[in-house]
Image: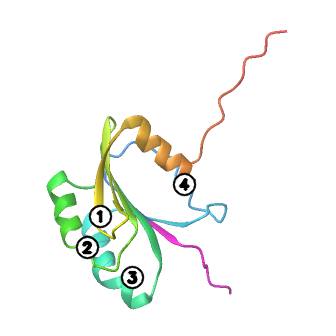
Amino acid sequence: MSQDTRRITLICRGVAAPPRSWRTGTDSPTRNILLQAFPVLTYALHNGLNELQQDVERVIIDHATTADAFLDMLTSLPSDFMGDILFIQDEKKGYLSATGRGGDRVLYALAEADVDFYLQTHSLTRVWAIPVLRIA
C-alpha cells in the first residue's frame, strides 16, 4: 500500500453549508479531508497534524462556525502553520487569511465570486460544464 504524498486540505462543513461538489478522490491535486465539527478541526491544527507530521496546505471553514470563533482560531494558530484559511460565512461573503511577505498573516474580505474563484483555482470543487446550445 503506497502512502498518499499529496498536501492536505482540511474542509470543515457546517450543517447550513450549501451543497458543493468537493473533489475528494485521487483526481484532486490535494488530499481533501472533510470534517463535520469545528472542534475537530481546531484539535487537528493544534495537536494531531504536528504529531503525525502531515503537510496541511489550506483549511476551509464552510458555514461551520461563527465569525468570533474563526477569529479566535486565527489568533491561536500554531506559529509554523503557513497555509491559507478560507472562512465562508454565507453565500455573499467570506474571508481569506494567508501568509504575507513578511511572514505575518493578512486577512482579505472576499465577495461570492472571489470565494468561487478560490475554490475553482485550487481545483477543490468540480466545475460542472454548462451545456452549449447549438443553433443549426
Q: Nearer the viewer, residue 79 or 39?
A: 79
Say which quadrant the C terminus sits in.
top right
What distance separates the C-alpha of mark 4 from that of mark 2? 22 Å
Secondary structure found at label 2: loop
- In the rendered image, which residue does mark 2 sit on? 77
Check if mark 1's residue and mark 3's residue have beta carbons within 8 Å: no
Residue type highlighted by circle 2: Leu
Q: Earlier in the sequence, mark 4 or mark 2?
A: 2
Say which quadrant the N terminus sits in.
bottom right
Q: Which residues are magenta?
A: 1-9
Taking the image as shown, residue 30 lies to the left or right of residue 1, namely left
- In the rendered image, which residue does mark 3 sit on? 49
Residue type highlighted by circle 3: Leu
Secondary structure found at label 1: strand
Residue 77: x and y in percent read 25, 73
Q: Earlier in the sequence, mark 3 or mark 4?
A: 3
The mark lying in front, picked from 1 and 4, is 1
Check if mark 3's residue and mark 4's residue have beta carbons within 8 Å: no
Disc 3 crowd rating (10 Å Cα; few below 14, some 14-19, many 20+) is: few
Residue type highlighted by circle 1: Arg
Taking the image as shown, residue 84 lies to the left or right of residue 2, namely left
Quadrant of the rendered structure where residue 12 is? bottom left
Q: Examine the rendering and report whether any part of residue 54 can be seen.
A: yes
Q: Earlier in the sequence, mark 1 or mark 3?
A: 3
Q: Earlier in the sequence, mark 1 or mark 2?
A: 2
Residue type highlighted by circle 4: His
Q: Which mark is residue 122?
A: 4
Secondary structure found at label 4: loop
Disc 4 crowd rating (10 Å Cα; few below 14, some 14-19, many 20+) is: few
Disc 1 crowd rating (10 Å Cα; few below 14, some 14-19, many 20+) is: some
